[in-house]
Amino acid sequence: MRVPISLEDLKRKKDEEESKASRPVFISKATRRETSRKEKKRKLEEYHQRPARNTTKRFRAEQTGEMPEHDTSKGATERIRNVYKRNTGTKYVTSSRGRHSSKFRFGWDESDDTAADDEFRHVGVPTPQFGRGRLGGMSGMFDVKGAIHSHLRDSRHWSEKPRDQMSDRDWRIFREDFLISTRSSSMPAPNPARSWDETGLPLRILDLIKRVARYHQPSPIQMAAIPVGLEKRDCIGLAETGSGKTAAFVLPMIVHLMNMPKMTAAIAGNGPYALVVAPTRELALQIVTEAKKFTEPMGFRVIAIIGGQEMDVQAMSLQAGCEVVVCTPGRMVDLLSRQMAALGNCNYLILDEADRMIDMGFEPQLADVLDCMPSEGRRTFMFSATMSRAVERLARSYLKDPVVISVGETGKAADNVIQRVEYFSSEARRRKRFIELLETLEAPILVFSNTRSGCEMIARNVESNSVVRPVIMHSGKSQEQREKTLEGFRTGRFNVLIATDVVGRGIDIKGVKHVINFELPKTIETYTHRIGRTGRASEKGTAWSLATDVDKLLFASLASLLQKSGASIPSEILREAKGSRGSRAITD
């Protein structure tokens, strides 16, 4: 008894046949030729075997107009009728428009009016002249050549063009190349200076830049800020650490002093012409050193009003007269409150590291200093690493329609700094690794701690377990001790400096190869400024951070910053960062 095939078997058999049929089959060239020859032979035999046409009946039908009995199709009827009418002389026109009615017609109908276009056919075409080509003696060839040369001229790179030939597109590309962005609420910001010669500075200052300061090319913040300062407009500069902000505000200030009356004893009683406010004594002294490169050859005096020095001596220096005062907020308020200083002449104000001053609680002192200055005609420069809400509030209160200049990515570590973060589960392992770094890394080395006691503890540990002899610097030291320590570290007399954040921001110490965060700071902004003490002036530097569980609150921000910089992230820090609120910024 035969068993019927199931549907599954039928389907499987059909699938196999379809699969086999769909596979490509290789056929040789000889086989293909033989198959083609047989097909042609078959068609030829069929052609010779078909019945012959009845031409007699067809001829009779064409002559009489009658249709043969065997062919009743519409096509045959039309064909015979057309032949009959042609033979009898009857005009029989078949319209071909029906077939092509949907196609575009390139010709004109007799009903179409083309006269209107003809009226304007020769409008604007120059009239040929005798021996002169065209009207005015100019030919179309010159126009074509001019257009070609104009295109080639405009397609050049911005570095190959004079300043007066720079287009808006060129300036946009230039700003993108140097990561410069500007914004202003009313008047547009001036275009940046591509070189020192384009800044608009007087020749005497340009000579000092090249001969004394030896600045070869302006930095991006200098390119953008100096033209704004020379236009006598307020400015907010946002740039990463080590970007050359000091020269960006000092040079326009020198031009301002050149346009002021010569300082005399009578004028000196009402204060200096310019005031620079900095958050720390060390940064103030650094600004004085940088400014004197230009002020002393020009005959201008610069003095520092900072804590740690005798107030009577500082008051006598002010009474003797000076064009520029560089101060810290607290000491300046002390002198103003005791009427030992005046700011009646001061109409040029510079706030350096404004966000740092606000973080340190100097906002009330800043307000007191600014209230003692004339508000009319005052020009204010504010420089900051970040644009926090407190900085915006300060800017709205004291700046008039400022030009905001941003260079690079604010709050980002410098590209010249290599970041290396290591995680330690025990304090003993961290201290051992720290000693290894001090003994193997190239000096000078800058070490950061969060507190004075931390600096002292680190120094004792180093002296007990290595041959390295570090020096310490924090706010508990006198001003004289701090200056001597910093100077010795700069000159190479000391190889290792252990300090708090008193030198973590704004201080320029050339040649620092390595920065070590023995203790991580509480905020990522402070971390950014600490590691910015190395990798300055286009040199490479390395920042080492020794992290423990105590620093967990910083891990999310730290991992995000390391990821942006392309640095490796320890697995412990990455795991903690993903579990915190800042995990959205962290990706694998």
Image (cartoon, rainbow, N blue to C red):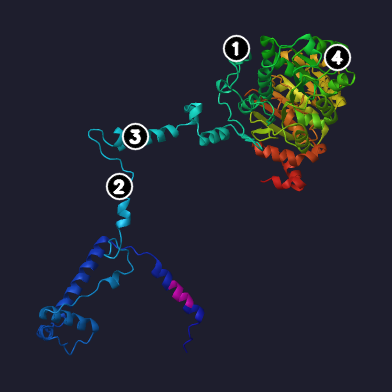
Q: Position of residue 560 (x, y in %)?
A: 70, 40
Name the residue at the right extreme.
338
Q: Is residue 3 above or below residue 158?
A: below
- Looking at marks 4 and 3 on the same chain, the residue that comes earlier in the sequence is marked by 3
Is the residue marked by circle 3 packed among few (<14), some (14-19), or many (20+) residues within 10 Å? few
- Lower position in the chain sequence, tag 3 or tag 1: 3
Q: Name the mark nearer the viewer: 2 or 4.
A: 2
Label 1 sits on a secondary structure element that is: helix
Q: CA distance from mark 4 to mark 3?
A: 73 Å
Is 54 in front, or is 265?
Answer: 265
Q: Is residue 217 visible?
A: yes
Q: Residue at x 72, y 13 (%)?
A: 491
Question: In the rendering, which numbered label is found on residue 211?
Answer: 1
- The answer to the question of whether label 2 and label 4 lie on touching residues, with beta carbons closer than 8 A, is no
Residue 15 inside the magenta-drawn segment: yes
Sooner in the amino-acid sequence: mark 2 or mark 4? 2
The amino acid on which the numbered mark 3 sits, given as a three-letter code, is Lys
Whether pointer 3 and pointer 1 mark residues with C-beta atoms closer than 8 Å, the reply is: no
Mainly helix, strand or loop, the magenta region?
helix
Amino acid bearing label 1: Arg
Q: Earlier in the sequence, mark 1 or mark 2?
A: 2
Would residue 17 appear left or right of 545 to someone viewing this image? left
Q: Magenta includes 193?
A: no
- Quadrant in the rendering for residue 52: bottom left
Q: Is residue 224 left or right of residue 300?
A: left
- Residue 494 appears in the rendering: no
The residue wearing badge 3 is 145
Residue that carries the numbered disc 2 in the rendered image: 122
Q: Secondary structure at mark 3?
A: helix
